[in-house]
Amino acid sequence: MVGAVLIALVARVLQAVGTRRVSDNDRRYRLRKTISFFGYAATVVMILVVFRRNLGGLSVALGVTGAGIAFALQEVIASFAGWFAVTLASFYRPGDRVQLGGIKGDVIDIGLLRTTIMEIGEWVDGDLYTGRIVRIANSFVFKEPVFNYSGDFPFLWDEIRIPVRTGSNWKEARTIIESALAETVSEYVPEAQQWWPRLVIAFKLEEASLEPAVTLRVTDNWIEFTARYVVDYRKRRTIRDELFTRILSAFDATGGRVQVGSQTIEIVGTPPQA
């Protein structure tokens, strides 16, 4: 027990000293995790050395109680196996934006048993932090899908829909939307084009268009344009705001030639009055 306490104290001191001298957040995190790992390893080695003469009897006792321990700690064992899978298979890393067990957020720590996430969404509209820190058992990687928003391809395809009033100059509306896309999101295309070939090599994927695109369809109430584009996963809300601002400002500047559509109801007749 004294040896374990000493090892823990040395690990804490090394973490405190090391983290003060490292300014980069990612390197500081990795340093803390590395010191913790070697602290656990040193504790295990110390226990083996202290009880080396009793290992024979200890192995018999563990063999007898192993089944009971495995049953009682099956969730703990599954969580540890989940940590092993996450570490080796790189399901996600600290800093990735993921969805685990129905919780969406940014991974801020990966422990032996639990993954810690800074939650986004829920009652907050858009991809913004709620302020809640959620700890999820690593065993979830075997039970539910793992959605990674940023691991292998740090971009997302996003879409906005713009209803244009029937009778407006739809060609001019399309030009306005295409110009807004070019001015707002075109900067992400070159970088996305550098990332995409890595996915094609690593997985069975077909080539996909990364250029912004505008499509049109006619509904009963308006002409609907859909703008599709690639964006940094952290800037979806900001880019949407900028796009809508540019588009609406340009619509206002047309002097009524292009107007935003809304649902209208036309009364073509009334029942005869008694």
Image (spheres, helix red, strand yellow):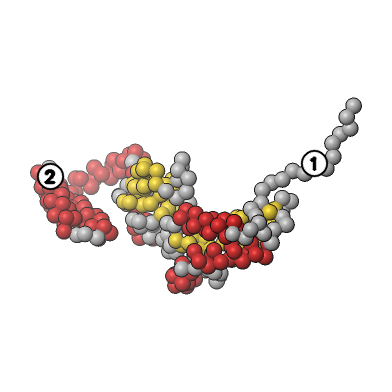
Residue 264 image position (x, y, % from top left): 72, 45
Q: Secondary structure at mark 2?
A: helix
The image shows residue 63, relative to residue 97, as above or below, that is: above
Left or right of residue 234, residue 33 in this image: left
Q: Residues within 10 Å of mark 2 (few under 14, many from 20)?
A: few
Residue toward you, 130 or 152:
130
> Circle 1 sits on which residue?
267
The answer to which image quadrant residue 224 occupies is bottom right
Amino acid residing under circle 2:
Val
Residue sitting at 49 percent across and 54 percent down?
241
Residue 265 image position (x, y, % from top left): 74, 43
Left or right of residue 13, residue 144 in this image: right
Amino acid residing under circle 1:
Ile
Residue sitting at 33 percent across and 41 percent down?
73
Left or right of residue 273, residue 198 in this image: left
Instruction: Answer with mark 1 or mark 2, whichever residue precedes in sequence.
Output: 2
Q: Is residue 143 visible?
A: no
Q: CA distance from mark 1 to mark 2?
A: 83 Å
Residue toward you, 153 or 47:
153
Residue sitting at 55 percent across and 71 percent down?
207
> Circle 2 sits on which residue?
5
